[in-house]
Image (cartoon, helix red, strand yellow):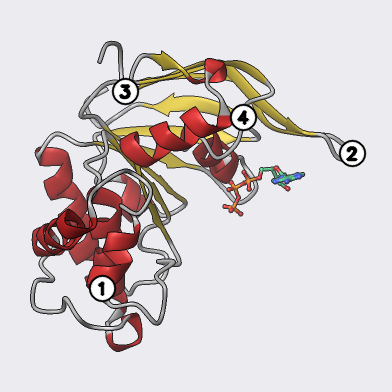
Amino acid sequence: MTGPAIALRDVSRTYPGPPPVSALRASSLVVGRGEYVAVVGPSGSGKSTLLHLLGLLDRPSGGTYHLDGVDVAGLSENERAALRGRAIGFVFQAFHLLPHRTATENVELAMLYNGTPRAGRRARARQALDRVGLSHRLTALPTTLSGGEKQRVAVARALVNEPTLLLCDEPTGNLDTVTAGTVLDLVDGLHRDGLTIMVITHDDSVATRAGRKVMIRDGMLAEIAGDDG
Ligand SMILES: Nc1ncnc2c1ncn2[C@@H]1O[C@H](COP(=O)(O)OP(=O)(O)OP(=O)(O)O)[C@@H](O)[C@H]1O
């Protein structure tokens, strides 16, 4: 792999409408491997739009996006899906766990389409759940898990394919402050282990965990200087 984890150059996204909405305007951003970046901004500023582009869930209207040195514009839909599954882990506010599957099964599902043999999936799911401190809840159904535990299952699911980039969208939005702290501690640990992390949030207490903050306002990205910057 060559190049930074993420390189956006003059990336824009206009929703056609009518009327057309310029949700992201010619924005550039380079994120090095192992960086922990928070994207903050008010409602409607373009955070989800950016996340969908970064996560290969949407295509920009203009500009270029290199992920791990790969110009993703040149990829077919199947290649984009394969790259997404291999390189990116997602954690969302609403957990998105299947209610009738155990914690282990929820994590196993992330490996369904990536060629991991069935026999290997269970062991890897257990390892991922162990990494997030849930080895005692392997067979629990999501309805029996606390909010923080559900989010930790979601983190295990995001990690199980060993992505290079973790994209988190308001990861603590459904959690109380104390539980949010434990999930953010977990994310801090992943960062220390070398994972590249982007957290999208409107919550400053979440953003301050990151080494670098980027503001988005009216679809424009701008760096926010750190305390020592
Ligand atoms: N599919 C769409 N079609 C048209 N306009 C859209 C679409 N999705 C988002 N928008 C608009 O684009 C702008 C940016 O929306 P986006 O969802 O990226 O903001 P956000 O910062 O994630 O907001 P929030 O914090 O409220 O989730 C908003 O003006 C929104 O109304």
What residue is at 89 percent from the left and 38 percent from the top?
19
Where does residue 220 sit, x and y in percent of width and height?
59, 27
CA gap between label 4 and label 2 equals 19 Å
Pair 1/4: label in front: 1
**Badge 2 vs badge 1, beta-carbon distance below 8 Å:** no
Q: Would residue 177 be seen by someone viewing this image from the given angle?
A: no
What residue is at 27 percent from the left and 38 percent from the top?
163
Q: What element carries label 1?
A: helix
Q: How many marks?
A: 4
The quadrant the N terminus occupies is: top left
For disc 3, the marked residue is 5
Mark closest to the chain's N terminus, 3 or 4: 3
Observer-nearest of 62 and 126? 126
Tell me which corner region of the image, top left, top right, bottom left or bottom right, holds residue 145. bottom left
Q: Is mark 3 on a helix, strand or loop?
A: loop
Mark closest to the chain's N terminus, 4 or 2: 2
Q: What element carries label 4?
A: loop
CA gap between label 3 and label 4 equals 18 Å
For disc 1, the marked residue is 103
For disc 2, the marked residue is 19
Identify the mark at residue 59; answer none if there is no mark. 4
Q: At label 4, which amino acid type do we have?
A: Arg
Tell me which corner region of the image, top left, top right, bottom left or bottom right, holds residue 73. top right
CA gap between label 2 and label 1 equals 43 Å
Q: At label 2, which amino acid type do we have?
A: Pro
Q: At label 3, which amino acid type do we have?
A: Ala
**Badge 3 vs badge 4, beta-carbon distance below 8 Å:** no
Q: What element carries label 2?
A: loop
